[in-house]
Image (tube, helix red, strand yellow):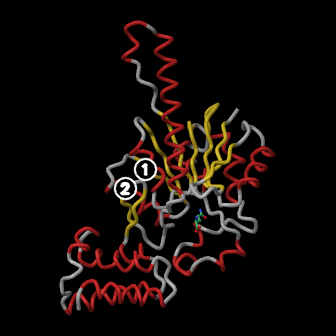
Amino acid sequence: MKTRILINEGEYRLTKAGVMDAHIDAEELYCFLKGCDKVVLFLMKEEEADKETEEAYFKLIEERASRIPLQHITGKQEFMGFTFMVSPDVLIPRQDTEVLVTEAAKLLRDERKAAAHNKSKSRGGLFKMFSAPPEQKVLDLCCGSGAIGISLAKICEDLSVTATDISEAAITLAKENAKTNRAEVEFLQGDLYDALRDTSKGKRVRSYDMIVSNPPYIKTNTIAMLQEEVKDHEPMLALDGGRDGLDYYRRIIADAHLYLKDKGWLMLEIGYDQGEDLRKLIIETGGFRTPEVIHDLAGRDRVVKCQKV
Ligand code: GLN
């Protein structure tokens, strides 16, 4: 069978099984099987695929048709241009979350520039060119695969990143991801801020320039409506945000001031319709300047950003 026909058949089987983006997945699975990229695939589309390839390919298609996420079959996901290993123990990094990372990186860069500018202004003269701004500290809560913290550590200069997650398995995978991406990130296991407790000997001695998080935020009773790939294969622990989806935001926002430096930033990924809820929650809790809701390219609520007073 010609490769082109093989992939068409794969796409047909995936479509029949209700898989979204069946064409992309049919190609991705072929590339995964042959260890090639899409350009190579394009060049060999008219070549005959041997029997072995055919059999192995349809096995992969069958797995995907049973609604196992593509990334659980290939074991990886691209995020911010980096490759992250994934497993059923962590949420598969989403493109939506790139909005959070991009905004956080922009803000950190601006603050760094401002700090360097102020330092050189206060020193003046010859010292101007030697004044490096101080290291910035970021805390990534509910880090999962580590995608957010690791990407920030790669993108931003002089960043010290601590990432925490309640799941031991997630922390193990995140450490692997930091290693393969050659990023230096400190990983601690524990429930939100509790993860920081051991190292601070029970006292809250740690303070950060920024807290970032993509916590679980799906309402418990809407989980049943998610795609099969998500509700049957991704960890509930990373999705279920309680009755109104806001359980983790309440806890994160309530204690954020204890771990943020003055004028430090809190940046949270939010669901497409949670902007107003988050704005209210932050204002009610107090201790922050007026929060800003940032939208994704489709114009939906995606990130809430606020600064400690
Ligand atoms: N954005 C994810 C989804 O739609 C949910 C992520 C989360 O709960 N943090 O499945």
Most distant residue in the front direction? 46
In the rendering, at what x and y percent does residue 272 appear?
Answer: 66, 60
Sooner in the amino-acid sequence: mark 1 or mark 2? 2
Q: Are marks 1 and 2 in contact (CB under 8 Å)?
A: yes
Kind of residue at badge 1: Ser
Specify the quadrant that holds the C terminus: top right
In the rendering, at what x and y percent does residue 268 appear?
Answer: 62, 51
Q: Measuring 66% from the left and 51% from the top, which residue is drawn there? A: 252
Query: Looking at the image, which is closer to me, 253 or 124?
Result: 124
| Mark number, residue 151 | 1
Query: Looking at the image, which is closer to me, 28 or 238?
Result: 28
Kind of residue at badge 2: Phe
Q: Quarter containing ligand 1?
A: bottom right
* Picture layout, residue 5 above or below residue 159: below
Helix, strand or loop at disc 1?
A: helix
Mark 2 vs ligand 1: CB under 8 Å? no
Specify the quadrant that holds the N terminus: bottom left
Most distant residue in the right direction? 284
Q: Measuring 40% from the left and 85% from the top, which residue is drawn there? A: 11
Q: In this view, does 139 lie to the left or right of 173?
A: right
Q: Is residue 150 left or right of residue 106?
A: left
In the rendering, at what x and y percent does residue 206 appear?
Answer: 56, 38
In the rendering, at what x and y percent does residue 147 appear?
Answer: 45, 56
| Mark number, residue 82 | 2
Helix, strand or loop at disc 2?
A: strand
Query: Looking at the image, which is closer to me, 270 or 263?
Result: 270
Q: Measuring 51% from the left and 67% from the top, which residue is drawn there? A: 91
At label 2, counting other C-alpha atoms closer than 10 Å, the crowd grade (few under 14, some 14-19, many 20 or more) is: some
At label 1, counting other C-alpha atoms closer than 10 Å, the crowd grade (few under 14, some 14-19, many 20 or more) is: many
Most distant residue in the top direction? 125
Mark 1 to mark 2 CA distance (whole Å): 7 Å
